[in-house]
Amino acid sequence: MIEISKFRAAAIACALLGITTPAMAQQKLYVAGYGGSFEQTIRKEIIPAFEKKHNVTVEYVAGNSTDTLAKLQAQKSNQQIDVAIVDDGPMYQAIQLGFCGKVADLPKNDLYGTALFKDDKAVALGLVGTGLMYNTKIFKEKGWAPPTSWNDLKDPKFKKMVVIPPINNTYGLHALMMFARMNGGGEKNIDPGFKVIQKDVNPNVLAYEPSPGKMTELFQSGQAVIGVWGTGRVQSFANTGFPVDFVYPKEGAVSLLVTACPIAKPNASPLASDFIKALLQPDIQLILLKDYGYGPVVKSVKVPADLAKMAPVGQRAAELINPDWDTINEHRQEWTSRWNREVER
């Protein structure tokens, strides 16, 4: 088994984007990616060693995938970001909009096919499953059986105890998609999903919460007991010692690829591709599995049994439902506006 590297944590100063001089920009690499526990892992396990090896300062810009995509759109005439780490849906949009360059010298033979993108414009760093998270302690105290189905979110006993991210967040979008699929629709007919969430799920929802930190706070306070989240987020929450577990619903969990691309721009730094490939090193893949529940995308990584309890590996990975991102991205803005009008009123 590959030994998991331990790097010394380093404090990284956060700089405002767009205020560096060209000379300074050559010495800095701007990486935009998720916040929360993912950011902590990147700052601790990746950045210090990368900075030392390449004599560069890495500035990490935290935000969810739609935040990062919005930054890329706002800066399209003068991109400040060098590397974007986002969910697969927004990544397809970023590629379509021309924001992504090619990952140089990508070791494709070492990667599973699901990790690859056309023309190497991006690459997956890990595999996540979207399903249900629940507080095992409260369920046990109440004598409730663990959830098994997406339909458990409709159970009246969970009134004002359910937390779901909104649909500008991939987890919330996956929930809408699954309720549509389970009720005669799907990505090409999303209406059944909206109807179920409005009529049957909404009465139980405490909050449609996009922030990972606030999501965990709602569970820690006991206000929320069940919600929709990904294996990565639930694994990192469980690693803190909090009594939560992840459920692969019987109707299926949804696949989510965590992806990265180097941003296309004049005088793009070659270190952007190097940073992405650093995240594909087998020891780092194991760290992302251990700390964050990501199913590895590198073929040579042997997954220890004690790290495979929650992550989508083996048969669980093979059974994940793959969204139709072409259809979703075509309608996502329209669905988000509808969600804001009809669900989060």
Image: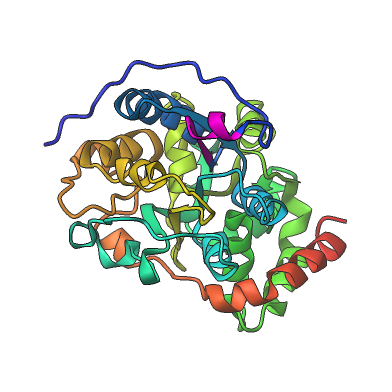
Query: What's the residue at 57%, 69% (across, down)?
Result: 178
The coloring applied to the image is rainbow
| Count of residue discs | 0
Left or right: 70, with 119 as reference point: right
Please state the extent of the stretch shown in magenta in the rendering. Answer: 22-31
Quarter in which the N terminus is drawn: top left
Q: Give percent across and percent down for residue 176.
A: 64, 66
Between 328 and 131, the one nearer to me in the picture: 328
| Residue drawn at 72 percent across, 52 percent down | 74
Question: Position of 117 compared to 14: left or right?
Answer: left
Q: Is residue 144 visible?
A: no
Query: Height in image: 342 above or below 330?
Result: above
In the image, is residue 216 part of the stretch drawn in magenta? no
Residue found at the very far front of the displayed protein: 23
- Is residue 28 in the magenta section? yes
Please indicate, yes or no, whether residue 21 appears anywhere in the rendered image.
yes
Residue located 49% across and 41% down the image: 233
User: What x and y, as percent, mark residue 49?
Assistant: 32, 25
Residue 265 picture location, percent across and down: 54, 54
